[in-house]
Amino acid sequence: MKSFGFLLQIDTLLKEPGRLQRPGQLIIFLRGLPGSGKSYVAELIKNEEELNSKGTNKPKILSIDNYFLNENQLETKDPKTGKITKTSVMEYEYDAKMEETYRRNLIKLVRKSIDDRFYPFLIVDQNNEQIGHFRDMADYAEANQFQVYFVELNNDLQICAQRNIHSRSSVDIEQIHKRWEQLPLRYEILDIRSLLQSDAIDEVEMDDASSATATTTTTEQNDAEEEESQIKYIISMELPAPLSASNEKSFAYATVKDRLPSIVTRVVDFLARNRGHYAKEYGDEGENECKSCIAAMGKLRYEIGRNKPILLLTDNHTDDVHLWNECLQKELDQGKKHLQHIDPFIEMKQYNFVLSSKATDVILAQLNTDIDQTINLLNHKATV
C-alpha cells in the first residue's frame, strides 16, 4: 500500500518561510483505514495552521464522520437525590447502507466550499480507499485553482482495529484494506512526521517513511537478499529508449508524469496571484490575457494528468506555431502518441550532460592519480 508520488514536508506549507510561497488555495485529502488517526491528524494540521497564521486563517475540516452523528438522549441519575436528568449527546453510529449517500453529500459539500472561496484551506477526512472516492473532488479543486495534497496514514490492520473508536469490526476494516487502491503518481504527498513529532506522538506514522530516518530491523542477510533481487531485476529489464517517457521504467516517465503537472500548477498559481497586477498595469486587455493563460494552463495540466493524446497546435496568435508543430509531429512520427510520452527537458538534460562530462573527466583523472599514488606508496612500504 505504499505510494510513490512526490513527497513534500508539511512544514514547507505550514511554517515560514515556505508558507509565504505556498499556493493561495489548497486542499488536503486524508487517506487511511478506520482507526489510522485521520481525524486526529486533521485537527493537528488545523491547529498548526491557525497557530502559524496567528488566527487569520482557519482551515475547514470536511469529514464524512459528521454524517454518521445522531442525537441521542443520555440519562444520568444523581446518586444522592435519585433524580434522573436527560441530556442530548451526539454519538457516532455507522450505517453501511447510508455510506454511499453520505459520500455523495460530502462531495457536494466540498464542491460548495470550493465555490464559496470562504475557506482557502480545506481538509477532507474520509477513508478515500478508492480513487473514485476522491477523484471528482480533486479534479474540481484543481480546476478551480486549488493545489491538491494527500496525507497517507499507516494502514496496519491490527493497529487500526485496536485504535478504531467507531466500533468498526475487524472484518469491516479488512474489507476496506482489500479495496485499497494506490494513489496516482501525479498527486503530491505530505510527509507529516515532523508534525507528529512536535506533538510528542509516535503511534501514527507515514506508511512510506524513508529508510534513511526510520528505524530498521533488517538483518544483513535480508539486505544481501534484497540487493541480489534488485540486481536480478535490473539485469532482466529491457533498456528503454534514451530519455523516452513512453516506458514506465524510465526516469523520464517519472519526470513527465509527476513534475510537469506540478510545474504547470505553479505557473497557474503565479498567474492567479499576479492577475490584479497585470490588470492594473495593462488594463482589461492584460487581465483578459491573464485569464486566458490560466484557462489554457489549467487545461494543459488536466490533459497531462490524464495522459491525453498529442494534438497539433491551432493557435494563430504567434509566428512560431509551425516550429512547435514540427516538434510535436516529430514526436508523433516516433510513435509517441500521448502527452506523458514527451519529455520537454530532453535538450536541457543533454546539454547539462555534455557540460558535466569535462568535470567528470577531471574527477576520474584525479581519482586515477590518487589510486596510482596509493599503490606506489604501498609498494614502497612493502619494499622497505
Image (tube, helix red, strand yellow):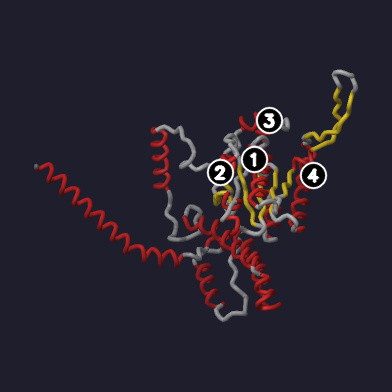
3D distance between C-alphas at marks 2 and 4: 36 Å
Element class at badge 2? helix
In percent of width and height, residue 269 lies at 63, 63
SS at badge 4 = helix
First in sequence: mark 2 vs mark 4 = 4
Q: Which residue is mark 4?
A: 101
Q: Earlier in the sequence, mark 4 or mark 1?
A: 1
Instruction: Give the Cα distance between marks 4 and 1.
Output: 20 Å
Rendered-image quadrant of the N terminus: top right
Residue 38 seen in the figure: yes
Identify which residue is drawn at 46% across, 35% down: 216
Q: CA distance from mark 3 to mark 1?
A: 16 Å
How packed mark 3 is, by other alpha carbons closer than 10 Å (few <14, some 14-19, many 20 or more), is few
Which residue was labeled with disc 1?
A: 32
Which comes sooner in the sequence, label 3 or label 4?
4
Tag of residue 171: 3
